[in-house]
Amino acid sequence: MSSLRQRLVERIRAEGPLTFAQYMEAALFDSKAGFYTRGPGIGQGGHFATSAEAHPAFAEAITAEAHATWLELGEPADFRVTEAGPGTGGLARTVSEGLTALGVGHELVLIERSTGLTDRQRTTLKGLSVRWVDHPAALSPAPGFLYGNEILDALPVRLVQWPDEVLVDADATGRLIETLVPADPTLAAPIVAAVTPRQGGRYAVRPAMVPLVAAFSRSISVGRMLLIDYGGTGAEVHDGRRPPVRTYISGQQGGDPLQAPGTQDLTADVDFGALTAAATTVGLVVEQLLTQAAWLRGHGCELPPANARTEEDWALAGLLDERLPFMVWLGQRQG
C-alpha cells in the first residue's frame, strides 16, 4: 500500500469517509506525495502537455491581451502580470519577454503551490525578476493582467450520483471504495440549475471555484483576468452520461480515480456558466466567452492550405480545431 493511500485510510478510519474533493485535494496536492507536489513531467514528453507548449501563437495571443490591457489602463508603472498555475514556467517566460519587447514595464508574479514545480520554474525563468506566492490572497491589489491555463480543471470537485453524494471510504483490507450518502441541497443546486438530473447520473460540483475567483479578483485593482480550460456551459458539462472525473498518466487515460492516489492526474470539465456567475458576484464584467479556436483566430491565427503547411502549421491546426472543448473566458475588473 502506498504511503499516501495508507495515510488516507488511517484518516478515514479516524475521521470517517472523505468527500471526493478532500480525496482529490490529497491526491493532487498532498505535501509529500501529491501528484503535483512531486513536480510531475509537464510539457512535451511528460505526463501531459498544454496548448502553451504546442505552438507560439498561444503565448503571443496572451501577450497581446496583456499588452492591450496595459494600454487601456494608461500604461501604469505598477502594472502586474500574474500567471496562476504556471507549470514549467515556459509560458510565463515567453509572455514576460514579449511584453518587455513591447515596452511594457511590469512585475511578474507566479501563483504556485507545488514546491516541485516551483523548483522547475526557477530554472526556466533564470535571469528574470519573478515573485512567487502560493495563493492570490497573498497579493495586494494592483493594476494588472492575470491569466491561467488549465488550472480550474484541477480544482477539487465533489461528486454526486443523483440524488446522493459520493464519499471515499475504506474497506477492511485497506482498499479505497465509494459510499453514498444523501446529497446536501446546496450541493445539488448548481446541477439542478443546469439540467434536469438523471437518476443515477454522475455530476461534479466545484465549490472551490467561487472563493478562488474572488481571490483572483481582489488581487487586481483594475485590469483583466483570462482563464483558459476545457469544459462548456450548463448541460454541456452536466450531462450525467460521461465520467465527470477523468484520470491521466503519461499522456494516456489512467485508471480508476481511487487507484494509486498521487500517481495520476485527476481532472474534471469546467462549467464556464458557473465561472461567469461566480465572477459576476465579485464585480467582474465578462467580456468574452468563446472557443480557444475562435479566440486564436481573433488574434490573427490562420492556416495555409493543407498541401503547403509546415510541421509548425500542423501543430497550430490542432489548436484551431473547433471540435476541441477548450474555452477562453475573459473578464474585466473596473476601478
Image (tube, rainbow, N blue to C red):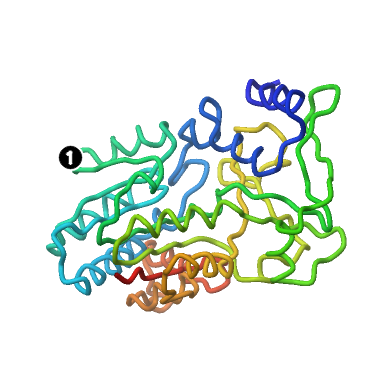
Q: Is residue 111 left or right of residue 252?
A: left
Q: Picture coordinates of residue 313 (x, y %)?
A: 38, 67
Look at label 1 and name its amino acid.
Gly
Left-right relation of 177 to 299: right
Residue found 80% across the figure and 35% down from its top: 177
Q: Is residue 15 left or right of residue 229?
A: right
Image vertical order of residue 222 relative to residue 46, above or below: below
For the residue pair 36 and 283, the one nearer the viewer reads as 283
The quarter of the image holding the C terminus is: bottom left
In the displayed structure image, the side of residue 179 where residue 93 appears, left or right: left
Image vertical order of residue 124 relative to residue 246, above or below: above
Q: Nearer the viewer, residue 5 or 196?
A: 196
Against 120, residue 245 (above or below) is below
Which quadrant of the rendered structure holds the N terminus? top right
Q: Where does label 1 land, which residue?
A: 127
**Residue ID at (29%, 36%):** 122
**Residue 4, percent across and down?**
63, 25
Say if 278 sits above or below 90 in the image: below
Which residue is rendered at x = 26% and y = 70% of the image? 69
Tally of marks? 1
Residue 178 sits in which quadrant?
top right
Q: Position of residue 74 (x, y in %)?
A: 16, 71
> In which quadrant of the rendered view does residue 7 lie?
top right
Secondary element type, mark 1 = loop
Query: 293 or 143: nearer the eye?
Result: 143
| Residue at (84, 46) in percent of width and height | 181
Relative depth, front residue between 49 and 71: 71
**Residue 183: % across, % down:** 79, 53
Please rate how many residues cluster around mark 1, counting C-alpha atoms within 10 Å: few if below 14, some from 14 to 19, many from 20.
few
